[in-house]
Image: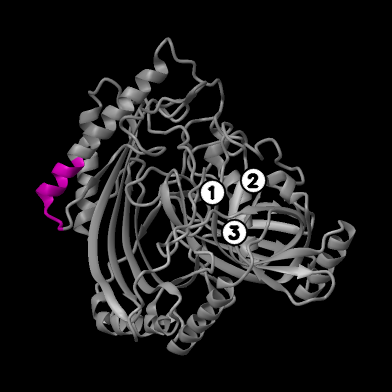
Amino acid sequence: MINEYQSFIPEIFVVKRFPACLKVFTFLFFGSIGPLTGQHSDSLVNLLNEEMKRQLSELQNAPVAPYYIDYQLNDVHYTNITSSFGSLIQSSKDRSRLLKVNVRLGDYQFDNTHSTEHGSGVDYESHQYEGMGGYSLFPITNQPDAIRYTLWQAAESAYKSSLREYRHIKSPTTKPVMTKVPDFSKEEPSHYYEPEDREFEKKFDLKNWEDRTRSYSSLFLNNKDLITGEVTLSVIRQRDYFVSSEGSEVVQNTIHYYLYVMASIRAQDGDILPLHKTYFGFQHDQLPGKEQIELDIRQMIAKLEALRVAPIAEPYTGPAILHAQTAGVFFHEIFGHRVEGHRLKDETDGQTFRAQVKEQVLPAHISVAFDPTITQIGNKLLNGHYKFDNEGVRAQRVQAVENGILKTFLMSRTPLDNFITSNGHGRSSPGVGTVSRQSNLIVETSKSQSMEELRKLLIKECKRQKKKYGYLFKDVMGGFTNTDRFTPNAFNIFPTEVYRIYTDGRPDELVRGVDLIGTPLSMFAEIGATGDEREVFNGFCGAESGQVPVSAISPALFVKRIETQKKPTAVQDTTLLARPAN
């Protein structure tokens, strides 16, 4: 299942899912390991290469020699500033380095990640996520002896875990899945290096951002019914190292600025109603200015006041319009996760689209691509950008659907029938094993209509279905989906701003307590039209390989039939004490 969005943490569409078969690595050593690069101006890269060469040499005498090793090292700096109702409540900086060592045993065709009738050979006591050989805290100073010691311990642990898996798969009582598809793809080694940014501390004005978050959050003091009113700036600055025995050497930097505005209000019946707004930039000056943010906060307060007295919606089935941002989350959940290639090799997964390549899966006017190579569309920045994935493969645009026809899947280095190479979508968060994941999901349409035309279609369809009203899903917090075979393959999207559009011409009515639910294939069949404007939804998605930055770009959708259910309530008793005067 896929995990739901957690308000202001950078975790927007998130997927809760039972971990698929964990994959580590296996091979009996044949011939030479791929070439390691020579001396480097970066002392840490040199240490990683030297220690890998030593480990490879010594492990040739192990019970089963490895055919592949990689080191994934993430050096992450966090800055978090939070203000609530005009007061600074947190201002902190942190740094950590996480190391994950992958050791594969066997060979590219058959290794310790190989699927069996009951999953893979993964040792679940040693792993938490697919492909994870355990992670280690890594020294934050480049002290050679400490680094060598950490690499030695991590490689020893990863090798032993992989060996247990390999022996399990090779045991007489285990039944491997018979397939000609390799367990690990062969890729050309990558070489890329970015120098470290040493100017961040000079450029980043901590005091200024403390004052700004305080000033923004003080606007929430103007409404006595608000339960929370917070503004948070989170800066995630990361330097990633990837070194492999095939000869790959990738060192790249990323920096993301997130400004989160969150507030909640108590409804008349005691239910707590939240709203949020997220701003994203690769640099601090790409975030909106003071006037725009203050305007957005005032509008948020006005919406919360309207929600406080809004009626609770009853369960409904009928026509709806998904506004562009909601449509982006919709496609992320019900389509994106079902074209992540590693799931389609997992015998416990529903494998919705595995047998539908070259078949029509969406209306003919809709195409879907995933493109991590771009940083923006128009003036809208995209959170799912990266240069190389977490397996050292260069990022690539993937045209998953063209004119409604399914073309391909998102691939890591875990091959499928007819898809035996990576397309640069092997992703993970620091310290977690890599699987195929989404990046920038881009929905395109060749037949668009204005919002006014979509509303006319909605009203016409409501009358045909004898419905007094249809729904407009204006804004959304996130969602989750199930893809496995043990639970219904359903999705749940969490709208925060929902309106009834009446057929008799009365004004749209704001309602609360609505969750959008359904199953993928039935929902795709109900798409009737697409809008002419696209919006970007930036966030983080969580699944087996942790939380990764993603974006979804989509036009609005007119859907002939959707289903809703009541949202769980979060009732909070009214306060016994009066709120202090401002």
What is the distance, in whole Å, between disc 3 and disc 2 at their CAs? 21 Å
- Marks 1 and 3, the one that precedes in the sequence: 3
Left or right: 327, with 30 as reference point = right
Q: Is residue 111 left or right of residue 521?
A: left
Which residue, given by chain and number where applicable, does mark 3 sit on?
329
Q: Which mark is residue 222?
A: none
Q: Nearer the viewer, residue 318 or 124?
A: 318
> Residue 185: percent from the left, percent from the top?
48, 37
Q: Are marks 1 and 2 in contact (CB under 8 Å)?
A: yes
The residues tagged by marks 1 and 2 sit, at their Cα atoms, a distance apart of 10 Å
Query: Looking at the image, which residue is at 51% across and 81% down?
Result: 296
Identified at 61% across, 64% down, the residue is: 512
Residue 408: which numbered mark, if any?
Answer: 2
The residue carrying mark 1 is: 423
| Region rendered in magenta | 141-151
> What's the residue at 15%, 58% (across, down)?
141
Q: Is residue 565 magenta?
A: no
Q: Main secondary structure of the magenta part?
A: helix
Element at badge 3? helix
Which amino acid type corresponds to the residue marked 1 in the rendered image?
Asn
Residue 142 in the magenta stretch? The answer is: yes
Q: Amino acid at mark 2?
A: Thr
Residue 196 placement (x, y as % from top left): 27, 67
| Along the viewing direction, whichever of 293 and 343 lies nearer the viewer | 293
- Please rate how many residues cluster around mark 2, counting C-alpha atoms within 10 Å: few if below 14, some from 14 to 19, many from 20: many
Q: Element under label 1?
A: loop
Where in the figure is residue 550, as x and y percent of width and height?
A: 50, 59
Q: Badge 1, how many Cα within 10 Å: few under 14, some, many 20+?
A: many
On the rendered structure, is 254 left or right of 374? left
